Image: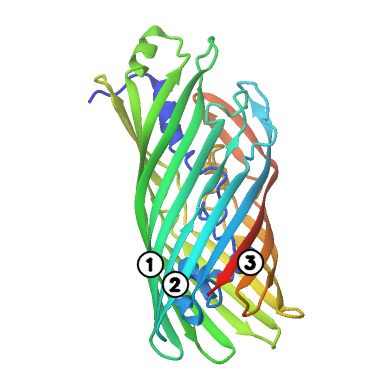
Amino acid sequence: MAKLPFSWLLAVLTGVICVLFTQLSFAGGFYLPEVGSPGSVGTAGVANVVNNFGTDSALTNPAGMTGLQRDQVLFGNQVLIPYQKFNSSIAEAGGDDGGNAGVLAVVPGFYAVKTLGDQFRAGFSVSGPLGGGFDFRDNFVGRYGAYQSSISGLAISPSVAYRIGPKLSLGAGVSALYTVFNEEIAVNQATSPDGKVKFEDLDDWSAQGFLGLTFQVTDKLMLGGLYRSKSDVDVEGKITFKNIANPIENRITSNLNNAKISFDYPQVVRLGLKYDATDKLTLMADFDWEDWSQFSKNVLSVDGTGPVAIVETLDRNWKDTYHVGLGMFYDLWDNHRLSAGVAYDTSPVDDKDRTIDLPLDEQLKFSIGYATRSESKWGHAISASALWLGDGKVDQTAQGVRFKGEFDSSWMFIIGANLQYRF
């Protein structure tokens, strides 16, 4: 296969593999810890690893399903409302700052647990672990890095749990992950108007296993642990070029119609504890490590009907991230429960390596929730989170053009609600 000789095209196509998960960074990278339940959204995700009380344990920690004594289902939904405004200080190609680039997303969830005797439980979940994107519009100062992108994800996850004894339970499951990616990038053509590259409906199915445990140290103290494996992903689909001015370059790009981007969802280790401080107050803490250095190298392949093909590898110098969180439940009157949490995640990338298409930074999250807590068949809850996504400083040269700036406002607001039924 011949290597395409036009440097601008290589720059555009190499740059795109950075863009894949921009502004979907709800953990250290782009995992979404909230799953649409009050114990998850309402505690900033802190309760997930010590979840032995909710139907969503089928996904968050399957070992916790042994704490449930009845068959039950949970329908959840959460709305992601981003507010992200970039402020440029250098813009060699002109343009504007794009206004609020956030794109609203709705992430549904369904969870079910079936009791199979005293020791066994089976679980099933359908969740949206990814969802959102950005739209700076096509006159953005950083349009040669990217100006529009979106991703959506679906996870179908069966799981099982077994209680070994009165203190220890183990669980396991596997997620079938479906990822869909779309993106548009401007092409710098010097004296001619910008061209465009569009990646349309690149998708793939992949698998990710997970293992969990819960250990009841004392009547008041429980420990939880969860491991998620890495998942190999190759999203593939259509690529199109528009308004390419040079006749030779236009002819070559018209023969390129297929793109594939390869990357890994990284492995994760999460540990947590839950302590019943009083009859009404439960305190929680969690810590995790996410192997984002594994995600650092991406491979982009582009080919079509002609003899020209491109295979490019990019190392974004990402590093592993760490998370720490604190949460609580407080039982109010008549089986009503209040939840709250705060969490912090380190940045997966240093300032010098950050790009506008993936401006991830440190994150700080505050959450609160309310739920009914009783043994009746029906239960409901509402919860909300506010995530500060860092200032995301960027100083980047894309397609020979430099721009520099940071995010004056970079927030994500999550509003969740769910309905639970116990059989």
User: Percent x, y for residue 271?
Assistant: 50, 73
Tags 3 and 2 in contact by the CB under 8 Å rule?
no
Q: CA distance from mark 3 to mark 1?
A: 22 Å
The residue positioned 37% from the left and 33% from the top of the image is 237
**Along the viewing direction, whichever of 396 and 415 lies nearer the viewer:** 415
Pointer 3 or 1: first along the chain: 3
- Of residues 12 and 34, the one nearer the viewer is 34
Three-letter amino acid code at the position of disc 1: Gly
Judged left or right of residue 389, residue 125 is: left
Question: Picture coordinates of residue 46 (x, y %)?
Answer: 59, 69
Relative to 156, say whether 46 is above or below.
Answer: below
Instruction: Decide: few, some or many residues near mark 3? Use Cα within 10 Å; few <14, some 14-19, many ≥20.
Output: many
Q: Are marks 1 and 2 in contact (CB under 8 Å)?
A: yes
Residue drawn at the location 52% of the way across and 78% of the way down: 52
Residue underneath mark 1: 173
Q: Is residue 116 visible?
A: yes
**Mark 1 Cα within 10 Å, few/some/many (few <14, many 20+)?**
many
Image disc number at residue 23: none
Mark linked to residue 38: 3
Label 2 SS: helix
Task: Pick whichever of labels 1 and 2 is earlier in the sequence.
Answer: 2
Label pair 3/1, CB-CB below 8 angstroms: no
Which residue corresponds to mark 2? Answer: 62
Q: Is residue 259 left or right of residue 342?
A: left
Return the x and y of residue 413 as percentages of the image width and height.
68, 52
Amino acid under disc 2: Pro
Q: Amino acid at mark 3?
A: Pro
What is the C-alpha distance between the residues marked 1 and 2?
7 Å
Q: Residue 357, percent across and down?
A: 53, 37
Q: Is residue 303 above or below residue 383?
A: above
First in sequence: mark 3 vs mark 2:
3
Q: Tell me the residue at 54%/38% (across/down).
A: 355
